[in-house]
């Protein structure tokens, strides 16, 4: 009897470890969700190859200080998840931790779209983003520069 226990003990221990790891894997899956959606232009046409980024929302009071620090260093906030739209403008971001996020989509030189979203455990959060045209850089820089210059001159 002791001989059989000696051989059976490691197998029982291994089976318990495998069972526990599977339960933990299931718990982890339940604490994540999926973000899917489409990206369209102002005319409602699908936007292919748009870059989709999921960013952590900014905390209150962080906006001005963090923005100034990052602008000075040339650093962009790191996205939590990224993806690209397919030919039909569709995207999917899997295994996203539960929480509130800012979802952004854009095409360089064309425009951007942003939306605040909530990811729920085991859920699929569909989002429709409509890209708005980017303002010409020259116009924005001139108006901001002119206003700043006038204020300094006073």
Image (cartoon, rainbow, N blue to C red):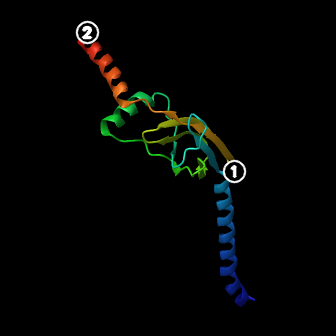
| Lower position in the chain sequence, tag 1 or tag 2 | 1
The answer to which image quadrant residue 147 occupies is top left
Residue extending farthest to the left is 153
Q: Residue at x 70, y 90 (%)?
A: 3
Residue 120, can we see it?
no
How far from the left and from the top, in percent, is residue 99? 60, 42
Q: Which mark lies nearer to you, 1 or 2?
A: 2
Dot 2 lies on which element? loop
Residue corresponding to mark 1: 122
Residue 16 appears in view? yes
Query: Where is mark 2, residue-wise?
Result: 154
Q: Is residue 142 left or right of residue 11?
A: left
Residue 105 place in picture, x, y as percent:
52, 41
- Residue at 57% x, 34% y is 42
Q: Residue at x 48, y 46 (%)?
A: 79
* Residue found 65% across the figure and 76% down from its top: 14
Up the image or down, 23 lies above or below 146; here it is below
Residue 28 image position (x, y, % from top left): 64, 56
């Amino acid at each position: 009897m002791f001989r059989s226990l000696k051989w059976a003990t490691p197998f029982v221990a291994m089976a318990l470890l495998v069972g526990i790891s599977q339960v933990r894997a299931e718990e982890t899956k339940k604490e994540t969700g999926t973000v899917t959606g489409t990206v369209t232009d102002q005319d409602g046409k699908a936007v292919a190859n748009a870059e989709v980024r999921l960013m952590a929302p900014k905390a209150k009071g962080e906006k001005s200080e963090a923005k100034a620090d990052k602008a000075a260093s040339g650093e962009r906030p790191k996205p939590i998840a990224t993806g690209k739209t397919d030919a039909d403008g569709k995207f999917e971001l899997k295994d996203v931790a539960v929480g509130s996020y800012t979802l952004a989509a854009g095409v360089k030189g064309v425009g951007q779209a942003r939306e605040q979203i909530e990811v729920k455990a085991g859920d699929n959060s569909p989002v429709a983003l409509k890209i708005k045209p980017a303002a010409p850089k020259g116009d924005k820089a001139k108006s901001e520069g002119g206003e700043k210059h006038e204020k300094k001159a006073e």
